[in-house]
């Protein structure tokens, strides 16, 4: 370890708004003398789309066929009801146990520093409930002249109910947005970053029910 | 060196006493007198000015009686002076803080968690094998099923779940003790991780531990598991809070107890926020809840309203916990941290209670019932598992709660079916008075409860506990008793007949198959309740079944515990000495049981405790004027309690006291019969003392008993005691054990010998032995004793001997014992006796001077000076300075004391002043001349 360089920003929470001056110090420490041609500071922003095994397929599917869509603004707040009948992508609907789950999200337009809130209530369920989770997904869409690629990544999963919860007793929906993995919803000609939340209900013995809600995040 | 002769100064003790005495002043009623009862007046405001120096006449009426201690200090005593000068702002602010604390901190009438802890751990145990899974395998499978995470993301998310990188610990087949040890290890590794600055690892440990609380296998153990794991959470909460506090503090200042978030700097806030963000991202509900609750207090760093917002949210969050048992414990934990951090936020406590009522029906739902079947646990043993958590929640809510709320809670509980469990917790946690006044209501509710659910006897037990604390309405009592009787016999009522019936019934139930062996704690508790009510021991022991009840405690440790309880109560409440044969028989039996439990392995503390209790008993036994009976009791006690030294010591003192009592009754003139009796007492002591171990105990008892013998005119017996003491001195070891520490014994020996000399003054010589034979024997022993090399104690003792011999050469001694002729009247100032006495003095003086000479070395000069001065003082006090040689010797000693500049000038000045003052007394004129020959050395 010869020389080390440390950039120390003055503000403890490291949050700056446009127009503000970012100030601090650069600490360079070393045992021996070091030669340098001046110290300069540059700020760079980059987006990196990684092609995982899964997103390759997605990339192929969207290739040449899908145009970037204008982000549809979901009305806020939103109420929802989940029953076997409301589900899509079910293989054998008859095998599903009966259940009725109701809930609402206080807003799908969220301030990034405020938690996502709402309530969920299991009115009835034949099968015992194993778990109810909130899954936060980031969707990145990238486009150029040749076509578009879309990649969805789970960035946080929060369990809000564990075990066979009491019927007809509302369970709070509450999720803090992780600071390092979320940003305001972003839409440019070639590139989009969007967020979605899935309410995931796991029933005994092995049923998985997902309800998807697009979110719009912003910074105030 | 020439031998100096000794000439004692003749003393007229009577005249000296008269001259030293203060003038007696007759007192009028209302005059000031220092020993009058003191009405303490505030000395700050009442400054007493006193004219003159005669304290007895200055103050006037009794209303202005002044504390003599403070009046000495001219008005203000040092403590109030100190308080008055202290910064007034400081006291003011501390008072303010106290006022505030009263609102925000629970009082001592709130039973703390710490006292519940131990009880839970001992009550909820298991013999089944337990497991600790520190990396929930099933979780992983569930994760893959849930979502399509990229490998990278999964690793990142599981980073928090994983304890050590890549380690998966599953510990199976643990016994309960193993489990407790493992948890303790985790607690330690948490502290270690924290200390070595591995904060993330610390957090991982806490998360892993809280996860264990979602595991309900071996459900009987769950309450204890909760206790163990919340201990870890407490540790963690404390560590985080301390760390953030330390960040708030600049280098010097300390964060005040009641700081506001504005006083917290950005770094501290950011660190605090970071913790909350980290915790908010914990995947699983239960660990996320527990870890956040554990650092609830840290919200204070962020905002004023933080806690009041957080508590309701966490309360709601618990609704997500499906298992009712897990959820009720989560509520208990939240109520606990809530009470610690913000006891004024009652709303959340109540919300927890009402939410719990809403989920109550789950207990009888399929999920729980299936689980019980799988684990083979019956409902009556499952339901009591809820009690510790519910009791705690109920206790938090009912603390200082208005009656209306309690009534509402009770009504809400009533509405739910099969509410025995709730009923029990209500009875455990609510104020005893509240319960007692509604006893009949409660009995009604208890009767309605389903037999198959919560055990009814536990309900009656809870009710009984309340009734033991608060009285039910007078009219209801009999009915309560009758109702309770039908079910179980544990209700206590302090009536002899009823108690007897209850005890008999318990005995009847517990004796078959030695059932009592499994119920010692309960039986013990019954005994405690009984003796708490019976302060009259003659009534208690006449309860027919009491002793048979005691016989059920067949395990020795429990038996001894019970005996100790009985004796403690006896000592506390027995006011009058007793000779009641019922009490004596029973308590002798009880004490004997305690005594017989002593063996080689018994701890010193335990022995001390037992001896204290037995002594308390012995002191309370009195047969009044039947002294012989009393002595035979002491003889019996000695044979019973021979293994406890303090008891034997007590017995010796008691017997000595008995002898002195006898003397008092006979007004000093023993009859043939009483003389024989006191000799029997003396003999008792003489043969008991040698069985003791403590050397100074023996020495002091020999001396003391010798004095008693002397006072009762048992001269040869007294001689025997003193001889025994003298022959014991050579055995005094260099070091003795005082309270577990080894200390040099010389100072104790010095003290003892001085005391001994004072007694020897009045011991008459034995006609068949030589003059002063005891003193001579003692001197020989002192001469032969191996003293510490660098100590002057031997010489100090010789100086004391010189004082003794001077006192012995007086015509009339300073004090006497009534009806004992001391040497002064035996010899009547016989010249031969005086010559013997002087010869002894010379020998002793020679020894002293010899020793002073050996001190003429550099390192010992200081000792030489002080010893020289002390010897000088002795000569001044006891020697006849009209004798030229003695006079010369004292002048020499004066010079010696000052020779090397070691003397304290002030002492020398004072001494000289004293001599000059004395020289003014009649017959002391020769001191004027002496004073002139004593120069004062000036220090340069």
Image (cartoon, coloured by chain):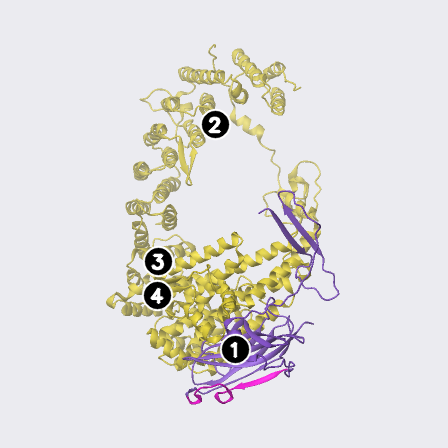
Q: SS of the residue at dot 3?
A: helix
Tell me, what hue is chain B?
Answer: yellow
Find the distance from the CA under tag 4 to the CA under tag 1: 31 Å
Q: Is residue B676 above or below residue B561?
A: above
Q: SS of the residue at dot 1?
A: helix
Find the distance from the CA under tag 2 to the CA under tag 1: 85 Å
Which mark lies nearer to you, 2 or 1?
1
Residue B7 versus residue A3: which sits nearer the camera? A3
In terms of sequence position, does the residue under pointer 2 or pointer 1 come before the other? Answer: 1
Find the distance from the CA under tag 3 to the CA under tag 1: 42 Å
Q: Residue furthest front?
A: A146
Question: Mark 1, chain letter?
Answer: B
Q: Where does the C terminus of chain B fall, quadrant-wise?
A: top right
Q: Is residue B46 above or below residue B880?
A: below
Is mark 4 in CB contact (under 8 Å) with mark 1?
no
State the residue position of label 1: B354
State the residue position of label 4: B126
Residue B122 versus residue B713: which sits nearer the camera? B122
- Report whether mark 4 lies on the same chain as mark 1: yes
In magenta, the rendered stretch is A76-94
Q: Residue furthest left?
A: B513
In terms of sequence position, does the residue under pointer 3 or pointer 4 come before the other? Answer: 4
Find the distance from the CA under tag 3 to the CA under tag 4: 27 Å
Q: Few, some or many C-alpha atoms within 10 Å of disc 1 (few <14, some 14-19, many ≥20)?
A: some
Q: SS of the residue at dot 2?
A: loop
Is mark 3 in CB contact (under 8 Å) with mark 1?
no
| Quadrant of residue B25 within the rendered picture | top right
State the residue position of label 2: B814
């Amino acid at each position: 370890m010869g020389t080390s360089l440390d950039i120390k920003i003055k503000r403890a929470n490291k949050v700056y708004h446009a127009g503000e001056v970012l100030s601090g110090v650069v600490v360079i420490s070393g045992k021996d003398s070091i030669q340098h041609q001046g110290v300069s500071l540059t700020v760079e922003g980059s987006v990196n789309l990684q092609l995982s095994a899964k997103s390759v397929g997605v990339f192929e599917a969207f290739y040449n066929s899908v145009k970037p869509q204008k982000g549809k603004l979901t009305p806020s707040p939103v109420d929802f009801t989940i029953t076997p009948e409301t589900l899509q992508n079910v293989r054998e609907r008859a095998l599903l146990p009966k259940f009725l789950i109701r809930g609402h999200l206080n807003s799908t337009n969220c301030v990034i520093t405020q938690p996502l809130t709402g309530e969920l209530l299991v009115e009835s369920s034949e099968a015992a409930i194993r778990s109810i989770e909130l899954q936060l997904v980031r969707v990145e869409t990238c486009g150029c002249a040749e076509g578009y690629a879309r990649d969805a990544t789970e960035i946080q999963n929060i369990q809000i109910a564990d075990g066979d919860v009491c019927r007809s007793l509302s369970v709070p929906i509450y999720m803090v947005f992780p600071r390092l993995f979320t940003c305001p919803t972003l839409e440019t000609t070639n590139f989009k970053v969007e967020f979605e939340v899935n309410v995931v209900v796991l029933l005994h013995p092995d049923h998985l029910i997902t309800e998807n809600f697009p979110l719009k995040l912003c910074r105030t | 060196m020439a031998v100096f002769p000794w000439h004692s100064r003749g003393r007229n003790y009577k005249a000296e006493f008269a001259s030293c005495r203060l003038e007696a002043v007759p007192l009028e009623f209302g005059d000031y007198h220092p020993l009058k009862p003191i009405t303490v007046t505030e000395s700050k405001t009442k400054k007493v000015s006193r004219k003159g120096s005669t304290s007895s006449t200055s103050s006037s009426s009794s209303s202005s009686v002044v504390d003599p201690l403070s009046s000495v200090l001219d008005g203000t005593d040092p403590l109030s002076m100190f308080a008055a000068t202290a910064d007034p702002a400081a006291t003011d602010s501390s008072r303010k803080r106290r006022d505030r604390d009263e609102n925000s901190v629970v009082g001592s009438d709130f039973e703390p968690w710490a006292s519940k802890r131990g009880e839970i751990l001992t009550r909820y145990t298991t013999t089944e094998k337990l497991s600790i899974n520190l990396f929930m395998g099933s979780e992983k499978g569930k994760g893959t099923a849930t979502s399509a995470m990229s490998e990278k993301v999964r690793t990142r998310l599981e980073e928090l779940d994983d304890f050590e990188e890549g380690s998966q610990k599953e510990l199976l087949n643990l016994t309960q003790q193993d489990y407790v040890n493992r948890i303790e290890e985790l607690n330690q590794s948490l502290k270690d991780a924290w200390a070595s600055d591995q904060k993330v690892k610390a957090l991982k440990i806490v998360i892993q531990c809280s996860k264990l609380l979602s595991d309900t296998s071996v459900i009987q153990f769950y309450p204890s598991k909760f206790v163990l794991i919340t201990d870890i959470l407490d540790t963690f909460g404390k560590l985080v809070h301390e760390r953030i506090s330390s960040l708030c503090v600049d280098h010097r200042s300390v964060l005040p107890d009641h700081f506001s978030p504005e006083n917290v700097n950005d770094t501290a806030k950011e660190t605090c926020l970071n913790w909350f963000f980290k915790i908010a991202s914990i995947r699983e509900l239960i660990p996320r809840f527990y870890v956040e609750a554990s650092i609830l207090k840290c919200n204070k760093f962020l905002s004023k309203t933080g806690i009041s917002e957080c508590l309701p949210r966490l309360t709601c969050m618990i609704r997500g916990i499906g298992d009712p048992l897990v959820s009720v414990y989560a509520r208990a934990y939240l109520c606990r941290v809530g009470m610690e951090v913000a006891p004024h936020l009652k709303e959340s406590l109540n919300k927890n209670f009402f939410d719990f009522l809403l989920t109550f029906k789950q207990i009888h739902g399929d999920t729980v019932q299936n689980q019980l079947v799988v684990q083979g646990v019956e409902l009556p043993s499952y339901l009591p598992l809820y009690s510790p958590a519910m009791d705690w929640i109920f206790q938090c809510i009912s603390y200082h709660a208005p009656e209306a709320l309690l009534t509402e809670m009770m009504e809400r509980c009533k509405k739910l079916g099969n509410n025995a469990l709730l009923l029990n917790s209500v009875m455990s946690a609510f104020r005893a008075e509240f319960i007692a006044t509604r006893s009949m209501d409660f009995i009604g509710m208890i009767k309605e409860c389903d037999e198959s659910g919560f055990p009814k006897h536990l309900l009656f037990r809870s009710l009984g506990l309340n009734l033991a604390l608060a009285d039910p309405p007078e009219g209801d009592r009999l009915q309560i008793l009758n109702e309770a009787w039908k079910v179980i016999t544990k209700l206590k009522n302090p009536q002899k007949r009823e108690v007897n019936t209850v005890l008999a019934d318990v005995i009847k139930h517990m004796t078959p198959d030695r059932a009592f062996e499994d119920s010692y704690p309960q039986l013990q508790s019954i005994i405690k309740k009984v003796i708490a009510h019976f302060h009259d021991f003659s009534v208690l022991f006449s309860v027919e079944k009491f002793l048979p009840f005691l016989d059920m405690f067949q395990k020795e440790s429990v038996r001894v515990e019970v005996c100790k309880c009985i004796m403690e109560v006896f000592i506390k409440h027995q006011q009058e000495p007793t000779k009641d044969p019922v009490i004596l028989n029973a308590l002798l039996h009880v004490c004997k049981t305690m005594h017989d439990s002593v063996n080689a392995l018994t701890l010193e503390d335990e022995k001390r405790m037992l001896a204290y209790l037995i002594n308390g008993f012995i002191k309370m036994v009195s047969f009044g004027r039947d002294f012989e009976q009393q002595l035979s009791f002491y003889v019996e006690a000695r044979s019973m309690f021979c293994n406890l030294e303090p008891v034997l010591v007590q017995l010796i003192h008691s017997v000595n006291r008995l002898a002195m009592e006898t003397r008092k009754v006979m007004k000093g003139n023993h009859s043939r019969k009483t003389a024989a009796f006191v000799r029997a007492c003396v003999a008792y002591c003489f043969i008991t003392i040698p069985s003791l171990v403590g050397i100074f105990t023996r020495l002091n008892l020999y001396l003391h008993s010798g004095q008693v013998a002397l006072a009762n005119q048992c001269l040869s017996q007294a001689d025997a005691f003193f001889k025994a003491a003298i022959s014991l001195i050579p055995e005094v070891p260099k070091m003795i054990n005082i309270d577990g520490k080894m200390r040099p014994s010389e100072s104790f020996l010095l003290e003892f010998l001085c005391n001994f000399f004072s007694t020897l003054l009045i011991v008459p010589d034995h006609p068949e032995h030589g003059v002063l034979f005891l003193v001579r024997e003692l001197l020989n022993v002192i001469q032969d004793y191996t003293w510490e090399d660098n100590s002057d104690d031997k010489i100090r003792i010789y100086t004391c001997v010189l004082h003794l011999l001077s006192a012995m050469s007086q015509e009339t001694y300073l004090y006497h014992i009534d009806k004992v002729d001391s040497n002064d009247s035996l010899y009547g100032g016989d010249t031969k006796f005086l010559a013997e006495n002087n010869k002894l003095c010379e020998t002793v003086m020679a020894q002293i001077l010899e020793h002073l000479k050996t001190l003429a070395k550099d390192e010992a000069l200081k000792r030489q000076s002080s010893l020289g001065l002390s010897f000088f003082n002795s000569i001044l006090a006891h020697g006849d300075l009209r004798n030229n040689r003695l006079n010369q010797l004292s002048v020499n000693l004066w010079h010696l004391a000052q020779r090397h500049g070691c003397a304290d000038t002030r002492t020398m000045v004072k001494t000289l002043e004293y001599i000059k003052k004395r020289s003014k007394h009649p017959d002391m004129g020769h001191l004027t001349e002496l004073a002139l020959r004593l120069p004062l050395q000036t220090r340069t």
